Image (cartoon, rainbow, N blue to C red):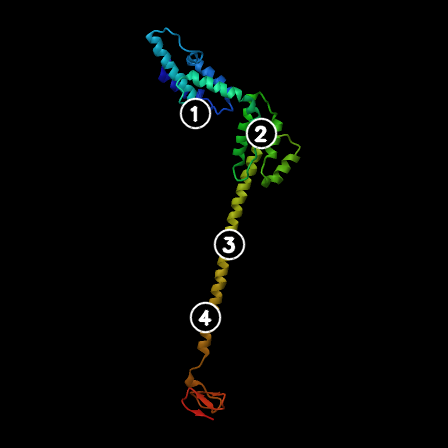
């Protein structure tokens, strides 16, 4: 197969593989083996080249070696790609992956089981996104030939809901209906959208109340200031000028009478005193 044609086919969505992260090695290996056979390059993984080859055979072997190595590396996660890209030959990469992840298969069993029970859904992240992440984790059990009943998965999702969903979780656990995975995800989506909508409405109402209270307080403050100013203005308006004031002591205008502490009588508004 032509190298450019093979690369285009391998990159198409129709035959795209999930990236191998170590936990899905068994499934990845079977799919990769099938594709490499389709592209007629799997033979480079079966053993070293024969000692005597024509120039054309050498050229084809080198091209197939490059393609096979590129196919394998392109389906690894970035971490594994960086780890294995220094290896020159496809067979070296393949054997190293087999040795590492076949030996770790038993440990992977325990690791995935631990992650399954440890997984918890948090309140500050999309509930449905976390449910999808949990189901991806569950799918890895298929590599271990472990089948988890759908009813058990639904129960696990309900029990892993955050504490802020306690009332809703209790409601689901006490219902007589048996939900499928699709049904429980639909219920969770509706509940999550309802909570977000109510939260937005409560936030808008709170802002409106604060605005009304602020407006009311400003209006009352303005009324008080206006009342004080009017009262001051009224007092000034009611106060008569000194030349119209009548002294209650002598009956004449233009001054007022005040008695001092030493007994002298002072004509306020005049420059002489009387006793």
Residue at 52% in and 51% down: 206
Q: Residues within 10 Å of mark 2 (few under 14, many from 20)?
A: few
Q: Mark 1 points at which residue?
A: 83
Mark with earlier residue (1, 4) = 1
Q: Residues within 10 Å of mark 1 (few under 14, many from 20)?
A: few
Q: Name the residue under label 4.
A: 229
Q: Residues within 10 Å of mark 4 (few under 14, many from 20)?
A: few
Mark 1 or mark 4, whichever is nearer to me: 1
Q: Which quarter of the picture shows residue 64?
A: top left
In depth, the one of 225 and 49 nearer the eye is 49
Q: Which quarter of the picture shows residue 7?
A: top left
Which structural element holds mark 1? helix
Using the image, determine if residue 153 lies above or below residue 41.
below
Mark with earlier residue (3, 2) = 2
Q: How far apart are marks 1 and 4 (CA)?
A: 82 Å
Residue 210, disc: 3
């Amino acid at each position: 197969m032509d190298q450019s044609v093979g690369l285009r086919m391998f990159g198409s969505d129709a035959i795209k593989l999930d990236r191998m992260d170590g936990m899905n090695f068994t499934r990845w290996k079977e799919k990769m083996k099938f594709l490499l056979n389709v592209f007629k390059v799997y033979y480079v993984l079966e053993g070293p080249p024969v000692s005597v080859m024509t120039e054309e055979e050498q050229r084809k072997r080198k091209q197939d070696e490059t393609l096979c190595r590129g196919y394998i590396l392109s389906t690894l996660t970035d971490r594994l790609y960086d780890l294995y890209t220094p290896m020159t030959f496809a067979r070296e990469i393949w054997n190293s992956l087999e040795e590492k992840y076949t030996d770790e298969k038993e440990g992977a069993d325990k690791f995935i089981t631990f992650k399954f029970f440890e997984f918890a859904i948090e309140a500050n992240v999309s509930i449905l996104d976390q449910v999808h992440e949990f189901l991806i984790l569950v799918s890895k059990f298929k590599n271990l030939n472990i089948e988890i009943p759908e009813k058990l998965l639904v129960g696990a999702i309900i029990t892993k809901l955050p504490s802020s969903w306690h009332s809703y979780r209790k409601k689901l656990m006490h219902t007589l209906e048996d939900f499928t995975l699709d049904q429980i995800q639909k219920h969770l989506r509706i509940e999550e959208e309802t909570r977000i909508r109510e939260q937005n409405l409560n936030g808008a109402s709170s802002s409106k109340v604060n605005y009304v209270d602020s407006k009311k307080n400003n209006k009352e403050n303005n009324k008080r200031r206006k009342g004080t100013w009017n009262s001051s203005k009224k007092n000034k308006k009611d106060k008569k000028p000194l030349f119209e004031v009548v002294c209650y002591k002598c009956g004449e205008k233009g001054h007022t009478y005040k008695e001092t502490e030493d007994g002298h009588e002072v004509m306020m508004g005049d420059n002489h005193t009387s006793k």
